Image (tube, coloured by chain):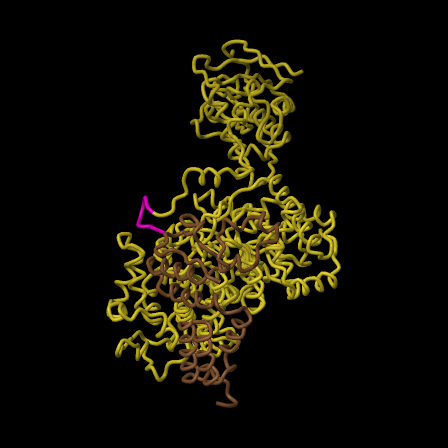
Chain colours: A brown, B yellow
């Protein structure tokens, strides 16, 4: 499916200034997601999910407001819109202490990065792998 | 041992002495600030990377140091900030000419030890002033806790509705039985939207379940992401900075707001304080939160609050935590949630440190319900204390996140929420919520007032709900089909807001029209008097207009004469014999007022005085002193026209004295100053004593009730009754003898 992308340089809050322009993950805009549509059975969870470009635009807002780290988080979140719920829960589990070996984390990093077009998230996992290796947070049995 | 003082023994029983107080023991992390093991501030950079921080080289970094050095410290700012004298940084916090942004920029380059060092230079008032400036959102708000022991969904929805109506921006629930979580999250969400559209809701359960419920659309924010200041504590909590960081991104990727949880004392409590001060470890936590890119944090010791409170400077240290979090640009939900003291004085005093400057959420969870229904372990402030909170806001012209409500509108909202839950349960095929439950929920005090539910059936249905494809969309449909169109629309709007992501920005909440209020579009711009958030206009009207407030004009206007007593003017008083006592009454007596502050009729009071005088065989006459409302002046003017030189002064409100013609006005023979405490026996004894003075016999003690709260309770009525007396002063009429006739 071809997603409609939000236009650049959106004014915050988007709900006030761009409400009818922001597509959800399915591509629908909010004016097509009314109670009547719900009653007609034409609203799916993807219609109510945020899409990558919107989170990227929110990251831009955070950066401009001086919240650099929030912006970086929102950029990782933007990538994660591509990652299914179960994969996210698995990724979280793998990053818990003592759950993964160094190489397991490196391969997770590569897989997330390539499979979901999620380079920042992949980097974050790789940085975790290095830190876990240096500070004793890896799985101990094999290596 | 010396003999036990009864006063010391009594004090020993007080709540304040049920608490533990200890000296510092830094080895165990029992030290608020300034442990000998706290590192000294330092930083070294090489090729744009931090290679030494607070005395530790890169090779010695633990996972937390690594995380902070990588993600939380602004490298470009750090050398400047670290070179700046800590006291001069501290001064920026309280300098109204320095905007918040500048302080944040300086702090963004500081290491944990440097931030602690800066805090050492601020006293409690300076920290409060600083917090007023550093809070991220312009308008303060509040978060509440809503739970009940029986986990009854109708009651939970009704309480959530009340929470919304009362103005809480966020409502949090948790569970006693984890499997109830899907129902509790659902009830909280639906109820809160009934109370006030735009109220954010969350459920505090295990991380994976939490995320799952959020993904289903049943909660709109999360704050379960706990971090700790030492790695062993982290590992005990089964997380690392990176695993928590991924969760923060995961919530945002689903359009769900989240903040972290930290708070001093947790590491010491877990046995992993590593000899460091609580504040130093807390700053490490806060820098992790910032580094993970979370928009905010709940801190202020939270559930460990009693531990810092056992130590010297503990409450100050907790305020420092809140201040540091805000100064790092984080949304702050500032504790005051877990039970912190047996002493109401101590609890309230501590609260003021956040209540007065204002934080993004004054409490991390005001317990909306009575203490016994609180599943968070008992709230610091409960449902019983709501009116106290509202009065404090009115007293100090402060918005601490609550608005007054009327009883009828509250019950109506509670009933509607319970009915909405009944409809949703019916439509989704969950075990029935009966009409009896709905009615009980509307007016319940605690869950004891609720009928029991079939817990086995509920839990089985909750399991099925969790594992089904049902989401908030099905809830919207159920609400709309049952005729709750407005609630359906609000629940749907909560979902639509996820598509926009506006409320992922720092310190975001919604108003009742779903306008987002965050630090981005409504930043705190405090820079001294005339700036920042002010309680004014409509908001100030709302805060002062408590339902129990009465219109004083109604009391002033309510003039009435005593129907059973007629005083007829006879002209200027004629001197009587030396057995005479003159009763001088105030200008309003019996004609514009009819009873005293003790609710005694003027008829009865006058009869009692006369009976007392006559019991000693003296004569009496009544004069009205139109010249003054002052008791001494009234009494003295009576004494001056008395054959014996003895006069009784009696104000309309009931205060009375015995005066003598040759005494100075403010000197007198006997004074009954506490009108609310006087009985007819008191007045009779006063009359008798006046007669004794006239006949040169020794007087008797006058019986008076002791009620120290009388002035407190009746000061407004006293003021108003007295104003009526003053209004009736008529100098031209002077002193007039009155013929008395009782009906």
First to last magenta residue range: B524-531
- Viewer-closest of A41 and B48: A41
Is residue B659 highlighted in magenta?
Answer: no
Relative image position of residue B332 (x, y in whole percent): 43, 59
Relative image position of residue B344 (x, y in whole percent): 53, 54
In the rendered image, the vertical position of residue B161 relative to residue B204, given as above or below: above
Question: What residue is rendered at 65% in x and 57% in y?
Answer: B148
Is residue B525 highlighted in magenta?
Answer: yes
Question: What residue is rendered at 61% in x and 29% in y?
Answer: B599
Residue lying at the far front in this picture: please name it: A1
Query: Which quadrant would residue B287 be assigned to in this image?
Result: bottom left
Query: Which quadrant would residue B178 be assigned to in this image?
Result: bottom right
Relative image position of residue B155 (x, y in whole percent): 66, 52
In the rendered image, the vertical position of residue B115 relative to residue B608, given as above or below: below
Please identify the quadrant where the C terminus of chain B is shown: top right
Question: What residue is rendered at 48% in x and 15% in y?
Answer: B735
**Magenta stretch prevailing secondary structure:** loop
In the rendered image, the vertical position of residue B114 relative to residue B130, given as above or below: below
């Amino acid at each position: 499916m071809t997603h409609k992308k939000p236009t650049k340089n959106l004014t915050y809050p988007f709900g006030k200034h761009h409400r009818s322009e922001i597509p959800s993950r399915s591509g629908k805009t909010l004016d097509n997601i009314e109670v009547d549509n719900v009653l007609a059975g034409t609203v799916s969870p993807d219609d109510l999910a945020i899409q990558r470009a919107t989170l990227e635009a929110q990251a831009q807002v955070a950066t401009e407001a001086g919240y650099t780290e929030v912006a970086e988080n929102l950029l990782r979140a933007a990538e994660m819109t591509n990652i299914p719920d179960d994969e996210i829960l698995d990724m979280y589990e793998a990053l818990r202490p003592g759950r993964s070996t160094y190489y397991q984390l490196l391969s997770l990093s590569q897989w997330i990065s390539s499979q979901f077009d999620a380079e920042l998230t992949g980097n974050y996992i790789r940085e975790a792998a290095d830190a876990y290796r240096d500070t004793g947070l890896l799985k101990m049995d094999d290596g | 041992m010396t003999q036990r003082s009864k006063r010391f023994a009594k004090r020993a029983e007080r709540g304040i002495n049920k608490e533990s107080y200890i000296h510092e023991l830094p080895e165990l992390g029992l030290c608020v600030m300034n442990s000998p093991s706290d590192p000294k501030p330092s930083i070294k950079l090489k090729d744009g990377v931090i290679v030494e921080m607070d005395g530790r080289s890169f090779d010695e970094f633990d996972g937390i140091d690594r995380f902070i050095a990588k993600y939380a410290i602004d490298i470009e700012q750090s050398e400047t900030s670290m070179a700046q004298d800590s006291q001069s940084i501290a001064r920026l916090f309280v300098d109204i000419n320095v905007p918040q942004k500048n302080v944040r920029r300086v702090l963004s380059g500081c290491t944990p030890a440097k931030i602690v060092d800066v805090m050492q230079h601020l006293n409690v008032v300076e920290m409060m002033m600083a917090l007023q400036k550093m809070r991220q959102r312009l308008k303060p708000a509040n978060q509440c806790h809503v739970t009940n022991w029986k986990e009854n969904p109708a009651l939970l929805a009704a309480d959530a509705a009340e929470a919304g109506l009362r103005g809480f921006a966020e409502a949090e629930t948790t569970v006693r039985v984890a499997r109830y979580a899907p129902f509790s999250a659902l009830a909280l969400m639906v109820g809160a939207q009934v109370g006030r559209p735009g109220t954010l809701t969350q459920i505090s359960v295990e991380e994976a379940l939490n995320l799952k419920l959020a993904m289903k659309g049943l909660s709109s924010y999360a704050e379960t992401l706990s971090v700790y200041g030492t790695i062993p504590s982290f590992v005990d909590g089964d997380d690392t900075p990176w695993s928590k960081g991924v969760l923060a991104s995961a919530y945002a990727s689903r359009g769900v707001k989240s903040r972290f949880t930290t708070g001093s004392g947790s590491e010491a409590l877990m046995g992993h304080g590593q000899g460091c001060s609580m504040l130093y470890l807390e700053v490490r936590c806060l820098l992790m939160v910032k580094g993970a890119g979370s928009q905010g944090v709940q801190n202020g010791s939270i559930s460990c609050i009693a531990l810092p409170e056992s130590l010297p400077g503990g409450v100050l240290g907790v305020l420092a935590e809140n201040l540091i979090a805000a100064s790092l640009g984080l949304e702050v939900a500032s504790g005051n949630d877990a039970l912190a003291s047996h002493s109401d004085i101590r609890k309230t005093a501590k609260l003021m440190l956040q209540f007065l400057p204002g934080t993004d959420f004054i409490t991390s969870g005001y317990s909306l319900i009575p203490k016994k229904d609180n599943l968070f372990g008992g709230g610091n402030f409960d449902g019983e204390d709501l009116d106290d909170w509202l009065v404090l806001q009115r007293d100090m012209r402060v918005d601490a996140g609550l608005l007054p409500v009327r009883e009828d509108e509250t019950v109506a909202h509670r009933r509607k929420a319970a009915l909405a839950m009944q409809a949703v349960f019916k439509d989704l095929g969950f075990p029935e919520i009966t009409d009896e439950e709905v009615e009980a929920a509307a007016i319940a005090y605690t869950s004891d007032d609720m009928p029991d539910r079939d817990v086995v059936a509920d839990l089985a249905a909750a399991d099925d709900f969790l594992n089904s494809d049902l989401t908030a969309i099905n809830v919207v449909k159920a609400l709309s089909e049952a005729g709750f169109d407005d609630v359906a629309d609000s629940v749907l709007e909560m979902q639509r807001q996820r598509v926009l992501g506006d409320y992922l920005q720092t310190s975001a909440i919604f108003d009742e029209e779903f306008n987002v209020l965050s630090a981005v579009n409504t930043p705190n711009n405090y820079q001294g008097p005339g700036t920042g958030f002010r309680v004014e206009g409509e908001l100030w009207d709302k805060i002062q207009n408590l339902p129990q407030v009465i219109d004083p004009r109604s009391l002033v206007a309510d003039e009435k004469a005593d129907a059973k007593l007629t005083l007829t003017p006879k002209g200027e008083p004629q001197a009587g014999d030396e057995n005479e006592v003159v009763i001088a009454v105030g200008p309003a007596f019996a004609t514009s007022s009819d009873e005293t502050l003790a609710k005694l009729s003027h008829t009865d009071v006058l009869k009692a005085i006369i009976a007392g005088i006559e019991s000693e065989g003296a004569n009496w006459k009544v004069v009205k002193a139109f010249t003054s409302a002052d008791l001494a002046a009234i009494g003295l003017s009576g004494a001056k026209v008395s054959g014996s030189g003895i006069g009784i002064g009696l104000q309309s409100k009931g205060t009375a004295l015995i005066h003598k013609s040759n005494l100075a006005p403010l000197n007198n023979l006997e004074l009954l100053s506490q009108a609310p405490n006087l009985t007819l026996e008191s007045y009779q004894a006063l009359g008798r004593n006046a007669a004794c003075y006239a006949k040169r016999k020794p007087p008797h003690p006058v019986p008076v009730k002791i009620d120290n709260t009388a002035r407190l309770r009746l000061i407004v009525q006293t003021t108003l009754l007295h104003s009526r007396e003053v209004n009736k002063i008529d100098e031209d009429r002077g002193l007039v003898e009155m013929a008395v006739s009782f009906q």
